[in-house]
Image (cartoon, rainbow, N blue to C red):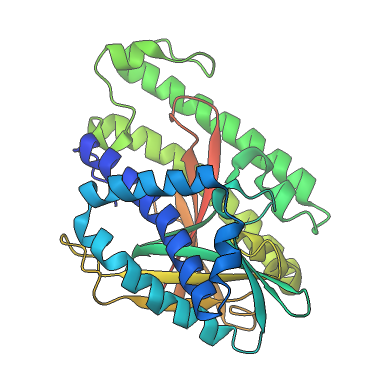
């Protein structure tokens, strides 16, 4: 959870998260390849300029989070054993680091190829225990049409959602205008808003302004809830398949590895818990829709004991007419 009162701390935390993600991908892939006896071929396939970047990341992480820096090699060894345990039936012959530069079009960070030339992609999540872990982010104005295209009504539902969003957003701007005296419109960068001392973070605004914004979020999330519920009631099996990419499975060849560390101020990395997910993980589990709470921006699906959150949020500023849908998982 980012601290809205301490932007400098947020920047540092975001940087540490990015560095640890890149380094953990590499160290884990290195450990897996070493345990398989193919470390040399793994290293040979990594471009020298990327190895130099990793070395730079290593130096920065050591100065920003020395406790994580020291623990990272052991964490990678433990995770590598966990990966190979879950892939024990596969004779892996090639390990590749693809990460954020991948052109595969899905969430994989590592690519493992077996002796039958079958490929498994490993998506890595290194995160705090008890937190929501992002699985997909998509534009609101294409969300239904893209991910629920198997339903014949998806285009018309998307149009309904888009029209509803525009109405809610315009109404929000008009209400903010009445309260502030500004001439906000759905166009422009709204520079006067910040010049007059108003924050772009709803939580740091006066309560009466924050209420207007969160009410708009809620109205959009509420319609999304009802439309998705109708899809599920129409064809539950089809809805299950539509959920897969939103849960982080854009391909059946993807496996997800979650590594959770203690959510404490000191960030205890000694007690790591791991979870392994494949596309079949949630199939057949009891699913229940939880409607958005008043003034909240998300709806939730309970998947057995886990929670899948679908949240409406701005691309950048709530003043601009560009919103997205963030999907995330929370395990219990």
Picture layout, residue 107 above or below residue 178 = below
Q: Quadrant of residue 139?
A: top right
State the residue lying farthest toward the left. Answer: 266
Q: 53 or 320: nearer the eye? A: 53
In the image, is 76 to the left or to the right of 221?
Answer: left
Q: Is residue 220 left or right of residue 71?
A: right
- Residue at left offset 34%, top offset 28%: 200
Q: Identify which residue, 308 or 77, lies in the foreground.
A: 77
Q: Position of residue 150 (x, y in %)?
A: 80, 59
Q: Residue 88 falls in which quadrant of the image? A: bottom right
The residue furthest bottom is: 89
Location of residue 172 with respect to 228 vertically, above or below: above
Height in image: 284 above or below 331? Answer: below
Mark yes or no: residue 11 visible: yes
Residue 276 is situated, as x and y percent measured from the top left of the image, at: 51, 78
Task: Give the position of the C terminus as an image quadrant.
Answer: bottom left
**Residue 240 appears left or right of 1:** right
Q: What residue is rendered at 70% in x and 65% in y?
A: 251
Please say if 290 is above or below 144: below
User: Who's the residue at 36% across and 43% down the image?
Assistant: 56
Front-most of residues 167 and 327: 327
Find residue 310 and report its horizontal and vertical position in percent. Answer: 51, 55
Q: Is residue 179 left or right of residue 282?
A: left
The residue lying at 78 percent from left, 45 percent from top is 155
Q: Report if residue 307 is visible in the image.
A: no
Residue 109 in percent (x, y) is at 56, 59
């Amino acid at each position: 959870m980012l601290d809205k009162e301490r932007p400098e701390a947020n920047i540092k935390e975001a940087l540490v998260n990015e560095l640890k993600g890149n380094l953990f991908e590499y160290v884990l892939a290195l450990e897996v390849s070493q345990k398989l006896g193919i470390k040399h071929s793994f290293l040979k396939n990594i471009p020298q300029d990327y190895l130099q970047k990793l070395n730079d990341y290593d130096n920065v992480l050591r100065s920003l989070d020395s406790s994580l820096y020291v623990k990272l090699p052991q964490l990678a060894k433990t995770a590598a054993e966990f990966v190979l345990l879950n892939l024990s039936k596969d004779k892996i012959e090639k390990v590749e680091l693809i990460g954020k530069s991948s052109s595969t079009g899905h969430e994989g960070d590592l690519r493992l190829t077996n002796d039958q030339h079958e490929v498994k992609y490993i998506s890595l999540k290194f995160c705090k225990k008890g937190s929501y872990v992002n699985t997909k982010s998509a534009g609101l104005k294409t969300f239904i049409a893209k991910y629920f295209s198997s339903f014949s009504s998806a285009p018309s539902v998307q149009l309904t959602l888009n029209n509803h969003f525009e109405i809610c957003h315009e109404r929000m701007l008009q209400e903010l205008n009445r309260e502030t005296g500004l001439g906000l419109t759905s166009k422009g960068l709204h520079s006067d808003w910040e010049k007059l001392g108003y924050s772009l973070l709803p939580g740091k605004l006066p309560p009466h302004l924050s209420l207007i914004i969160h009410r708009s979020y809620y109205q959009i999330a509420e319609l999304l809830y009802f439309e998705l519920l109708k899809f599920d009631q129409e064809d539950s099996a089809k809805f299950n398949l539509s959920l897969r990419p939103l849960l982080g499975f854009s391909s059946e060849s993807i496996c997800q590895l979650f590594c959770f560390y203690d959510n404490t101020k000191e960030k205890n990395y000694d007690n790591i818990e791991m979870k392994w997910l494949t596309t079949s993980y949630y199939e057949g589990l009891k699913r229940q829709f939880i409607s958005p709470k008043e003034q909240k921006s998300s709806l939730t699906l309970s998947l057995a004991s886990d929670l899948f959150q679908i949240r409406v949020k701005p691309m950048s500023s709530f003043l601009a007419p560009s919103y997205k849908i963030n999907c995330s998982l929370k395990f219990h």
